[in-house]
Amino acid sequence: MQTFDLEAEGLRKLNAQLHAQSADTNQTVWDIINPKGSHAIAVGLDAPIEVNVRGSTGYYCAGMNKQATVHIHGSAGPGTAENMMSGKVIVEGDASQYAGATGHGGTLIIKGNASSRCGISMKGIDIIVHGNIGHMSAFMAQSGNIVVLGDAGDALGDSCYEARFFVRGSVKSLGADCIEKEMRPEHIAMLEELLKRGECDAKPEEFKRYGSARKLYNFDVDNAGAY
Amino acid sequence: MKDFDARGIPHTTPRQSATFSQDINSDIRRAAATGIYDIRGGGAKRKVPHFDDLLFLGASISRYPLEGYREKCETSVTLGTRFAENPIELDIPITIAGMSFGALSGPAKEALGRGANAAGTSTTTGDGGMTPEERGHSSKLVYQYLPSRYGMNPDDLRKADAIEIVVGQGAKPGGGGMLLGQKISDRVAEMRNLPKGIDQRSSCRHPDWTGPDDLEIKILELREITNWKVPIYVKVAGARPYFDTTLAVKAGADVVVLDGMQGGTAATQDVFIEHVGQPTLACIRPAVQALQDLGMHREVQLVISGGIRSGADVAKAMALGADAVAIGTAALIALGDNDPKWEAEYNELGTTAGAYDDWHEGQDPAGITTQDPELMKRFDPVEGGRRLKNYLKVMTLEAQTIARACGKNHLHNLEPEDLCAVTMEAAAMAQVPLAGTNWYPGKPGSGY
Ligand SMILES: Cc1cc2nc3c(=O)[nH]c(=O)nc-3n(C[C@H](O)[C@H](O)[C@H](O)COP(=O)(O)O)c2cc1C
């Protein structure tokens, strides 16, 4: 295992070393100590390595991740795992705004709560939140899944496209064109797999599914008030 | 029409209202019929003070000119010298602005790459991501990082020669993009992770940052991902050029791209295009002032766009302090858009060559702003590339001609002192003297 003291050695060196890891690296496990809320930790990774961040992170930790597993043993700042392509990011604490924003793939697991705009503009990522999510989450979400074991804030899924949202608790309000949808057997199966992947102790049957009513897909003057 | 009525009283000449003009009335009828605002491509069509309102003085006794064709007049420019390990070196200071794949066809993007390559300049991706055609045919490609993040991925980011964070576009400061269902082919839909045939709205704000402090961190992230190798541009609309330039520089931009209100767009509301933002001419001096106040003029390069059409425009923008310019609409016209040879088909579409701006509808007779495979066949990317190269060369020669006449051995040596203005408005905006005077409105110490 490689231990990297971020405070002592600096961000540039950290990311340069992580970027230098190839698919067949032997240095597969990294421990980053003293992150102290720094921004852009472990961004742009593209190798099947495991990075443990021992503490809390600032903006954009694990941004644009591919292949790697980044495990934040603390809370995470805004834009964690933004535009992730593949791999896995786990936040032990809470996550600030825009967690998983525009993510194309991979899994983001938040053990605490996620703040507002979680999964904004998501494009295929799976986001699993053990706690609650804040307002305007999944705004313009295009594809992928959000699973929330707690409650969702105001305007969930506003102007969303094909993304699916599974919420166990309450939803304060649904955004424009977002509706509750039937949980069919295929959704139960899908959710079962997501809950397993997210290390969740919950049953698919306890959740409700939400998604797009697809009424705003093509402009219709009679819906103008909803835009 | 008869001159007199039945009682022998003379008719007055029928008089059109300047306020309720035929144009305006047709807008009202269109709105009444449809219930939705007009969406179109292109830039502001209204007349605003522009480069045409400036003139070069040329050399005289106090300044001597350089010999055309014999004495050198350099045109090269390097963009991104502030932080990037690999700045962009261009032979000419005219770049191709970001235009989305989706708005333009694959072959049109290819032609832009071919023409720019041959002329020694860069092209820029756009909303919707990077296509292999344009990466393959552009030796210097700037990758746009837009609010929608359609097609955005770290692999393409790492393939880029520079990154342009798009905050705004001159055609629609504060607005997002629009790509209507007709143009969402399978390929466009797949690149954008959206169902085929739906209207795509691109957001007006970035999803994971707001404000200058966040922008600084976003730039840090992008630099870290690309290992500080490539320049990072920030593109802003001509809204508040002094403050936007200041904030972009403070956030760490290598290059500021400033797009005035005449700047083209693939599609947005007509009301937005015509009524929001400042004319290009009005934006340059405040932006240059901001750079000078920060001690960053020429350290952070300024690229100006919005209505650049000729070498004279290039020279004027540079004389006012720009390091380079970018062109969108003019490049499309060079490729063959709005060519009178398609007049019959433009008429079918209810328009005429030169006025065609329904680029979002995907029916472009010239086969450029379309995803229709049949229309696309009309456009030959090799020929298009050749035409663009010729046009870029002509603009460069024109700018050199002017610079030599002003006694300058590099386009960058052009200066405001080489200019005068023919209107008060242009004098005020460009801060150069009204022709025949040594005065412009707002000149310090002039009392006006
Ligand atoms: C067809 C078309 C598509 C465009 N697409 C984009 C885009 O995707 N992103 C962007 O920042 N600007 C876009 N623009 C604006 C140009 O980058 C540029 O700012 C503008 O065209 C410059 O003004 P000009 O057209 O007068 O040269 C587009 C412009 C046109 C004409």
Image: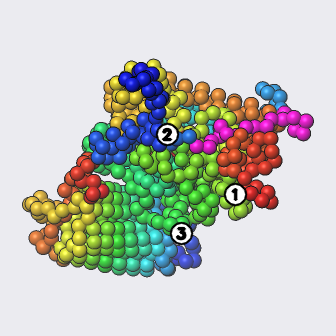
The image shows residue B11 at horizontal and vertical percentages of 45, 27
Where does label 2 land, which residue? Answer: B18
**What span is colored magenta in the figure?**
B48-65
Q: Taking the image as drawn, is residue B372 in sight?
A: yes
Where does label 1 land, which residue? Answer: B289
Query: Which amino acid does the dot numbered 3 rest on?
Result: Asp
Question: Residue visible at 46% across and 70% down?
Answer: A59
Left or right, residue B409 beside residue B153: right
Q: Mark 1 or 2 closer to N-term?
A: 2
Mark number, residue B313: none
Q: Relative to the observer, which residue lies in front, B282 or B66?
A: B282
Query: Which amino acid does the dot numbered 1 rest on?
Result: Gln
Secondary structure category for the residue under label 2: loop
Labels 1 & 2 near each other (Cβ < 8 A): no
Residue B63 sits inside the magenta stretch: yes
Could you tell me which quadrant the C terminus of chain B lies in? bottom right
Q: Taking the image as drawn, is residue A27 in sight?
A: no
Q: Chain of mark 2?
A: B
Q: Relative to the observer, which residue lies in front, B267 or B210?
A: B267
Q: Relative to the observer, which residue lies in front, B221 or B127?
A: B127
Residue A164 sits inside the magenta stretch: no
Secondary structure category for the residue under label 1: helix
Could you tell me which quadrant the N terminus of chain B lies in? top left
Q: Is residue B334 above or below residue B441?
A: above
Question: Residue visible at 39% across and 20% down?
Answer: B344
Where does label 3 land, which residue? Answer: B213
The image shows residue A60 at horizontal and vertical percentages of 44, 67
Within 10 Å of disc 3 (Cα), the crowding (few <14, some 14-19, many 20+) is: few
Left or right, residue A201 beside residue B293: left
